[in-house]
Amino acid sequence: MRLERLGRYEIIEELGRGAMGVVYKARDPLIDRTVAIKTVALDLSPEESEAFMHRFYSEAKAAGRLNHSNIVTIHDVGESNGVAHIAMEFLQGRSLREILDSGVVLPPEKIADIVAQVADGLAFAHENGIVHRDIKPANIMVLDSGRVKIMDFGIAHLPTGSRTWAGTLVGSPKYMAPERIAGRPVDGRADIFSLGAVLYEMLTGCPPFQGDNLETLLDEVISKTPAPPRSRNRALPFAFDYVVAKSMAKRPDDRYPDASAMASAVRNFHDPRPPPFVPEELLPSAHSPVAGAAASPDDAAEFEAPVRINSPQRRRLAVFGGTAALVVLAGAALVSWRTSNAPPPPTREGDAAAPAKKLVGADPGAPDVRDDETEAAERATPAVAVASSPPAAEVRPTAVATPTARVGLAVAPWGEIYVDGKRKGVAPPLTEIRLAPGKHTVEIRNTSFPSYAQSIDLAANGSLKIRHKFQ
């Protein structure tokens, strides 16, 4: 039987059906306004029904306060003949799910625009203390005007049956954050993870996690790091690899701190600069425990993923390291000035002049990471000349600095430089490294391409240039 009225609303037509209920196009006779009515199907006991309606009104009331251009406006909530419903603004457009299912390939600019608008809406909601918990393509509406709206705030995560009410996960597992699967408390960073998963599907045409069954799927969400988007589509700007990895980090602390930061990163996907990296030893472990739907909060506390990111703690380490380097250079400059302005020490005939101390890093082309051979040579080199020669019986040979060779680097678009298995930095900005004479293996890594390796044989004080372009 066709439904003609729901509360005071006059039903015009059915727009669609989903797991939660039916969506209708309706008319509000009080103000002659077209609205969308979403019903919430209930399969609850009387006790559960009362608790549900209390939570339903509470959630919908909170969502109704979200007045933002990227969030669907909620007009009214109610219950009629045992059917809970929510009235919201009627939108002309298509859901992102419909767009993706149609086979349309969206250009990077359009993808970035959609994701950035969703992130803007999430940032506003999070600032007002509301987490969506079910960001997925079906809950993202792209209007004919190009405006993007987030749907189902306030009811996306409401349980609608006895099993879900008892504690089973509510949401879409393909886009669900690991902490939700483990039953841990969530905040806005769970929405950031879900939006990262949506971005991944928009870029590659497939979800990041595709288990054959629910248990396998949940295991993948917890333990698997998806292949970078560019491994599936080389035409994508490499910045998307970093945005996806950052937003989908297994640990919430490793993700973007808020949705505004993610929106900014997505909008700047054309930035040619390489993303920030940290030394290999500071990266999270690549060995994460595999847990299923029954994972405990204690299991979730151990989640780690091999994502190259900069946490606040690592940034503090970087600042401390940079400050220490400045202090050392300043002290060396002061010693050099005092030495150059002091009267020369008396020398005896036949004495040899002491070798001058060279400051590593004074050369603008010097590498940002010094290798072990150079540091050992510097420690062995005397800092100042001796005033006189020691007695003949105590004469010791003067340490001589080990000669080094220069290796120039020209890498596009960027690459991590490893020499004999040791990380030296990222090029660019790194343009040159200094190595001890002899044979070395130089490897250049980029997360989107197979690594490149080259064997070199360096002569003392020699130089060579390594050029490589990832394609």
Image (cartoon, helix red, strand yellow):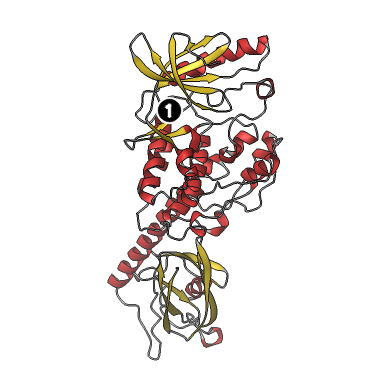
Residue under the point 41% across and 37% down: 119
Image quadrant in which you'd find residue 466: bottom left
- Residue shown at 37%/30% (left/top)? 92
The percent coordinates of residue 196 (x first, y second) are: 49, 43
* Depth check, front residue: 114 or 288: 114
Residue located 33% across and 13% down the image: 32
Residue furthest front as drawn: 1
**38 and 214: which is toward the camera:** 38
> In the structure shown, which secondary structural element does the residue marked by tag 1 occupy?
helix
Q: Whole-percent x and y of residue 275?
A: 43, 55
On-image quarter of the C terminus: bottom left
- Give the residue number, with chain letter if any, for mark 1: 125
Write down the quadrant of residue 236 in the picture: bottom left
423 to 308, vertically: above or below: below
**418 sits left or right of 66 in the view:** right
Residue 292 sits above or below residue 159 on the image: below
Left or right position of 264 against 217: left
Q: Is residue 225 visible?
A: yes
**Foreground of the two, 149 or 20:** 20
Residue type, numbered disc 1: Ala
Across and down, in percent, residue 379 comes to: 50, 71
Residue sitting farthest toward the bottom: 350
| Figure check: 11 above or below 98 | above
Question: Relative to residue 414, is residue 291 depicted above or below?
Answer: above
Location of residue 84 (image quadrant): top right
Give how far across and how far down residue 172 sits, in percent.
58, 35
Q: Quadrant of the N terminus?
A: top right
Report whether residue 303 is seen: no
Give the residue drawn at x 42%, y 24%: 128
